Amino acid sequence: MFRKQGKKENEMAQSGFVKVARASEIKPGQIKELKAGSAKVAVANVSGQYYAFSPWCPHQGWPLWSGDLKGELVRCYLHRWQFNVRTGENEAPGGIPVTLPTYPLKVEDGEIWVDITNVKPFRVDSAEQA
Ligand code: FES
C-alpha cells in the first residue's frame, strides 16, 4: 500500500502536479491561499468541486483568498471585480475583459494536487477593449 502511494505521488509530480492540501481542509464556499512548491495558489471549494487560481487579483494585486465566494464567482474586496474561479473570466457587470490565471487541479485519495507548470495565463482581450 505505502509503496503504491509513493509510485502514484511520483507520477503526479512528474506530470507537474504538486500536493497542496487535504480536500477536507477547504470547506464548501471557502478559499484558501496555499503553497504549491515555490509558488502560491488559491484553491476554492465550490459545492465540492475544487478550483485553483492565482491568489492575487489581476487588477491591483489584492489577495483574492480574502474575497467573497458566491458559487463560482470570487469578488475582490478592493474594487469589486468578480472572477469565475473555473474559467478565470472577469464577470463583473461592465468589467473589462481580464482573465484571472487558473491552474489544472486534481483530487486523488482526498489530496488536492495543482499543476503549477500549466497555468492558463493572465489575459486582456484587446479585441473587446475597442
Ligand atoms: S484589486 Fe481587485 S478589483 Fe481592483
Image (cartoon, helix red, strand yellow):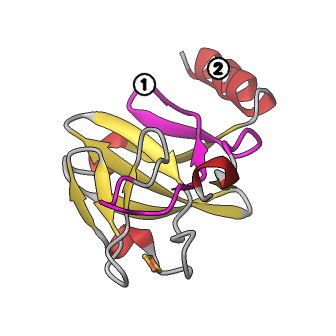
Mark 2 Cβ and ligand 1 under 8 Å apart:
no
Q: Image quadrant of residue 32?
A: bottom left
On whether residue 93 falls in the magenta region, the answer is: yes
Q: Residues within 10 Å of mark 2 (few under 14, many from 20)?
A: few
Count the numbered circles shown.
2
Calculate the distance from the C-alpha at mark 2 to the C-alpha at mark 1: 10 Å
Give the answer, above or below, for where 59 lies relative to 34.
below
Rendered residue at 33%/75% (across/down) = 66
* Residue 87 numbered tag: none
Segment colored magenta = 91-120
Give the answer, above or below, for where 109 lies relative to 37.
above
The type of residue carrying mark 1 is: Asp
On whether residue 130 falls in the magenta region, the answer is: no
Q: Residues within 10 Å of mark 1 (few under 14, many from 20)?
A: few
Question: Residue farthest to the right?
Answer: 14
The C terminus lies in quadrant: bottom right
Rendered residue at 70%/46% (across/down) = 116
Q: Image quadrant of residue 49?
A: top left
Residue 39 at x, y = what percent? 69, 62
Side of 28 relative to 99 (left or right): left
Q: Are marks 2 and 1 in contact (CB under 8 Å)?
A: yes
Residue 120 at x, y = what percent? 66, 42
Q: Which residue is under mark 1?
A: 109
Rendered residue at 76%/27% (across/down) = 15
Q: Which residue is under mark 2?
A: 8
Q: Quadrant of ligand 1?
A: bottom left
**10 and 18: which is toward the camera:** 18
Side of 125 relative to 38 (left or right): left
Side of 22 relative to 57 (left or right): left
Under circle 2, the secondary element is helix
Which of the two labelled residues, at mark 2 and mark 1, occupies the earlier sequence position?
2
The type of residue carrying mark 2 is: Lys
